[in-house]
Amino acid sequence: MKTLRHLGGILLGAVGLLFFFSSLGQILAPTEMSRWNALLFFVTLGCLPILCAAALLKRSVMSVHYRCCPECGSADRAPAGMMLKRGNWWVYQFGGWIIASLWGASRENQVRCVRCDTLYFTETRGTRIAGIILWIVVLFFVIAEVLDSVQPQ
Ligand SMILES: [Zn+2]
């Protein structure tokens, strides 16, 4: 159920984002669609799914499971403060800097145990949010690409 809500939220977010931008384009540069129709589209198909997605994903972000220290089991941790190379060459090549930086931000953070100084990796709210945005952006481009290819020329 949790996974389903998570996936549903991401999918809704991507679809909403797609309608958000396409109807925004219609409002700014109306073609065959009237401005009022475009505005209606914008609100119902663009903003509404994004709000629903945010509601669905909120709990997912709030329920991030922080890992405890593998050595002593303590939950007290501090940021490790070490700069790690987090970019991925392949991601950068195929996704550009937006995807690459979201990818980097969605990787688990290194933290330091306050009690025994052990360094370990854990998920944080920030990595969870970056991961969600990453998937929404990826899906957004995939759907846009598919729609573009099925559209008659
Ligand atoms: Zn520890």
Image (cartoon, grey):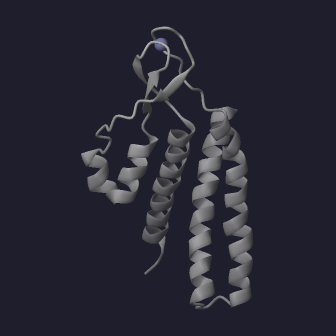
Q: Residue at x 39, y 54 (%)?
A: 99
In front: 120, or 41? 120
Q: Position of residue 97 (x, y in %)?
A: 34, 58
**Residue extending furthest toward the top:** 72
Residue 109 drawn above or below residue 139: above
Task: Give the image location of residue 6, x and y in percent.
Answer: 63, 41
Residue 116's image quarter? top left
Q: Is residue 12 above or below residue 118?
A: below
Q: Position of residue 79 (x, y in %)?
A: 46, 32
* Residue at 51% across, 24% down: 77
In screen coordinates, is 108 left or right of 82?
right
- Residue 41 coordinates in the image, percent (x, y): 70, 75
What residue sits 71% from the left and 58% below the top? 51
Q: Quadrant of the C terminus?
A: bottom left
Between 57 and 145, the one nearer to me in the picture: 57
Query: Which quadrant does the N terminus fall into?
Result: top right
Residue 107 or residue 91, whichever sits in front? 107
Q: Is residue 125 above or below residue 34?
A: above
**Quarter assignment of residue 60:** top right
